[in-house]
Amino acid sequence: MFRYLLLEMRRMYRDRRFVFFTIAIPVAFYLLWSNIFAKNSGLDTDTGLDAKTYLLVSMASFGALGASLTTTGPRLAAERQSGWLRQLQVTPLRPAAVIITKVLASMCLALPAIVSVGLTAALTQHVRLSPGAWAAMIALMWAGTLPFAALGTLIGSLAGADAAQPLTVACYFTLSILGGLWMSVSVLPRTLRHIAHWTPSNRFADLGWSVVAGHAPPVSDAFVLGGWTVVLGALAIVAYRRATVRS
Amino acid sequence: MSSRTQDRRHYAADLRKSSVVRMNAITFTGVSKSYDTVRAVETLDLEIGSGQAVALLGPNGAGKSTSIGMLLGLVRPSAGTVSVFGDTPGAAVRAGRIGAMLQDGSLVQGVTVREVVEFVRGLYPEPMPLEEVLALANLSSLARRRADQLSGGQAQRVRFALAIAGAPSLLVLDEPTAAMDVESRRSFWASMRAYAAGGRTILFATHYLEEADENADRIIVMTRGRIVADGTAQEIKAAAGGRTVRFTIGDQPTAGLDTLPGVTAVELRGGTARLRTTDPDATVRALYASGVQVRDLEVKGAGLEDAFLSLTGDN
């Protein structure tokens, strides 16, 4: 399986344009929003963070979410259609190993997205955090991408190559909005606010917001994110098995 | 009955059992497959001993690919069981005993030929050395090329390399030469025979008759989901209509040719008569006795093509 992970990473990083945009988009949005909102120096009501620090976490989450969804869903669907995954199916590699590897590989692109937004925040917006807070934020947010990578593999196993791309984008935007990555959840209507509380994206960003605000994230974050990972991951493995054996 | 006889019987039974397990690479027992209302494969019973090179011959839609899919665990049978070296197809695949070259489909993107072959090799417990795989598949000079930037014939060679990389005991090829020109086809079969020479079992599907004739020890002819003939190329030709007696008849009357002994069909074209017969000796004897002036007499075995058409035709 380690060999498969290496092969997948090699394939992903050779797609330079893809890697560039995956990392450049959250960085560009971070620069845009922080320049617009930095002028109103008010603090966020929920977290007590100033705009540029709050946005650091939002855009790092946005980037990590995008990286983990786009490297899994559309690619897996395309490989299913192209016959490559069928070829792998007649080798000793197990179906679960395919899904697990896709998840791990996507996390390997989420990490640079998180780190790049962090670097941009520190270098251009003078966001100052303790080394411990930086390390904790990056590590927690990296681990927190798991449910999104699992969701991507589920999309890739269920949808055809044509449908996977728009479906991924729809999930990407919905999760970003409900997660409070574009604007604070506090501005959403009440019902949506309740739903937002249970989304993996909101809990994911909450990991980062908590750490940069100087306290440990609530345990419920881990439960919600863990729950989504287990459910989506299991569904993805089942869906992938079904997609590859014609009954 | 003495206990000694009993022992001997047990021993014989054990021997028979173990030799069945060892000899059969593939066993289909009452296997059928339907897609919705379409019956793709009808009750298939089949045994293929290990070390054989077997061709699965049939027109499009005969059920060849579905049968291969079931053999590889890619398609679940509607009824019956498939076993590969005494195990389920899935278990045989996981144990690395099967290598397969599937129909069409593009290769993986973004890696070189060497990288993808090396990767697939690494998935098997006892793979063939990398350089040997590349040489056997005639890929040594293409090893650094991107796998997604190859011509159709070159891509087929990569697929062949992926199928043999793990040195599987059973090699399954589904219409392997479909995208190849004549020259690539010839060198492909040479590679395949070199691989088979190691005592491995080969099963390939094809609708090219001459490929089956030249490369298989045994030919299984399928049509509309059923096996209609099974044997060596010779046996199939014989079973399907015997031989042809051909001679120049000119403008002599042709009445009565169809009643000569053994004759099953008469074909007249431009002064030439072709009689298909099950007994050429009797046919020729009676032909001379009939008073017809026979010139340019030729007796030929029916081609595999004739056999194939008569087996898969509507009658």
Image: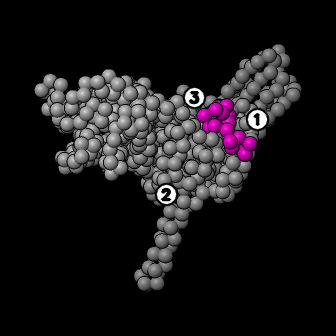
Give the residue type that dot 2 points to: Ala
A141 drawn magenta: no
Q: Which residues are magenta?
A: B139-156
Which of discs 1 and 3 lies nearer the camera? The answer is 1
- Name the spot of residue B154 as percent of width and height, x first: 68, 36
Does residue A141 appear to the left or right of A104 in the view shown? left
Q: Quadrant of the C terminus of chain A?
A: top left
- Residue assigned mark 2: B95
Magenta-drawn stretch, dominant element (helix, strand or loop): helix
The residue identified by callout 3 is: B313
Disc number placed over residue B183 in the picture, else none:
1
Q: Element at badge 3? A: loop
Q: Residue at x 50, y 44 (%)?
A: A9
Q: Position of residue A129 (x, y in %)?
A: 32, 44
Q: Earlier in the sequence, mark 2 or mark 3?
A: 2
> Of tags 2 and 3, which is closer to the observer?
2
- Local crowd at mark 1 within 10 Å, few (<14), some, or many (≥20)? few
For label 1, the SS is helix
- Marks 1 and 3, how far apart in space? 31 Å
Give the image location of residue A125, x and y in percent: 37, 33
In this view, the residue in front, B252 or A139, is A139
In front here: B67 or B182? B182
Q: Is residue B283 visible?
A: no
Other-residue count near label 2 (Cα within 10 Å), few / some / many at <14 / 14–19 / ≥20:
some
